Image: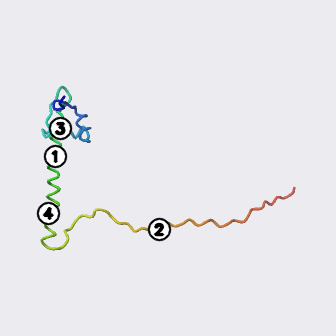
Amino acid sequence: MSNAGETLDLDGVAALFGAEPETVAQYARTGELPGTRIGKGWIFLREDALAFLRQRIARDTAVRRAAHAKTDRATEQDGSPAKQKPVGVLLDHRPRRRRTELPALPAITSHTTSP
């Protein structure tokens, strides 16, 4: 049996994408994600949802590669490293202080007075 005709509802596509249902609904309303409304709910073909996801992954990957290639070209042109945003912040490591023991206190003797 082929999965080509399998249909998904809004929640099913959201689970497939790992996204919120409202995000999927926005893509469907704008026409980016092929689907149709049956009554009050959206219906999608699984293969259309996967094709949409493949297209988005390819586009976003191309954008990242172009940005990376741009920083590489900038480095090659002037010979200096390209300015990049910091990835993280290094913090000064301070050793933990050991707790010192409390000084021994003198014993308290009770002073009772006789009546």
Quadrant (top left/top right/bottom left/bottom right) for the N terminus: top left
**Other residues around mark 2 within 10 Å, as few (<14) / some (14–19) / many (≥20):** few
In contact (CB < 8 Å): disc 4 and disc 3: no
Provide residue 54's location: percent of width, then percent of height.
16, 44
Identify which amino acid the numbered label 3 is placed on: Ala
Quadrant (top left/top right/bottom left/bottom right) for the C terminus: bottom right
Does dot 4 land on a helix, a strand or a loop?
Answer: helix
In contact (CB < 8 Å): disc 1 and disc 3: no
Q: Residue at x 14, y 70 (%)?
A: 76
Distance between the alpha carbons at the discs numbered 1 and 4: 21 Å
Identify which amino acid the numbered label 1 is placed on: Arg
Q: Is residue 2 left or right of residue 109?
A: left
Identify which amino acid the numbered label 4 is placed on: Lys
Instruction: Tell me which numbered mark, 4 or 3, is placed earlier along the sequence.
Output: 3
In contact (CB < 8 Å): disc 2 and disc 1: no
Q: Which residue is mark 1?
A: 56
Q: Is residue 2 above or below residue 73?
A: above
Instruction: Tell me which numbered mark, 1 or 3, is placed earlier along the sequence.
Output: 3
Q: Which residue is mark 2?
A: 95
Q: Is residue 104 above or below residue 34?
A: below
Identify which amino acid the numbered label 2 is placed on: Pro
Indicate which disc residue 70 carries.
Answer: 4
